[in-house]
Amino acid sequence: MAVLAPPQVQPQQLDFWSTGDLRLATTAGEIVALDPWSWVWFAPQWLEGSDQLMQRLAEDVPWQAELRVMYDRVLEVPRLQAMLDSSSFDPEHPFSAVRRGVEHAVGPLMPQAGFNLYRSGDDSVAWHSDRVAHAHPASTVALVSLGASRRFSMRPVGGGAARHWHLNSGDLLVMGGACQRHWQHCVPKMRHAGQRISIGLRATDSVRPTALRRGGTFGSPSCITVA
């Protein structure tokens, strides 16, 4: 199976830009080459004003509790969910500004956005890969984290050592290349945690982040600091 190799890591410093009470940037982060075809870009504190966005989404998104059949039992999905077309948000809504910021960083996005509301540490998402990989050998999945800090983990499909990130409010994590084919991710339960919202934005190609434009290449799994 032919899979697109990761792009070269080429960082460029971009200015902050503001809209309303939000302040967005793609000025720093860390690129992790998980394997020769899969990469993660983690940008802490990418979004300032995340509390305002979280409050608006908590009120405006039509959250749903879903049921799923697992092991011959009907179980409630341990979080609230919604899948919305981005055009359903007014252009002045803070979500629209965040979507434009993500698109500015990673390129054209699919119109739909996925939302998950973790009500407490009891809510979680099990190991999985996004379904976008079923039709696209390379893809980009961008996650914007709002609210309480939670651990985000990734492991190779078929087993192997896991990698972990602690996502705080306003952090951006982007999975690219063949991540959705070669790796799984999860948000495990934890004993104590407040409310958290995760925004998922996807592209059907492994686009080269425009924030990463000045030297450095992928090779063996490693970390590269973007300054």
Image: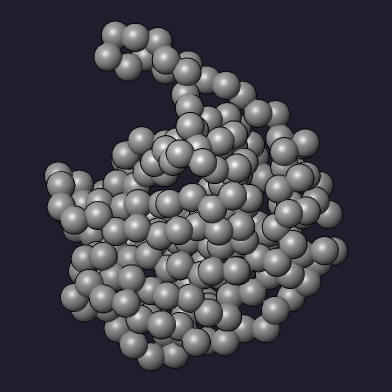
* Residue sitting at x 37%, y 65%: 40
Which residue is at the front of the view, 68 or 89?
68
Where is residue 120 shown, x and y percent of the image? 56, 35
Where is residue 87 shown, x and y percent of the image? 71, 44
- Residue 89 vs 35, above or below: the answer is above
* Residue sitting at x 65%, y 57%: 99
Where is residue 32 shown, x and y percent of the image? 33, 71
- Residue 105 vs 186, above or below: the answer is below
* Observer able to see residue 94: yes
* Residue sitting at x 63%, y 50%: 147
* Residue sitting at x 57%, y 21%: 65
85 left or right of 76 in image: right
57 left or right of 139 in image: right
Which residue is at the front of the view, 56 or 216?
56
* Observer able to see residue 144: no
- Residue 17 vs 76, above or below: the answer is below
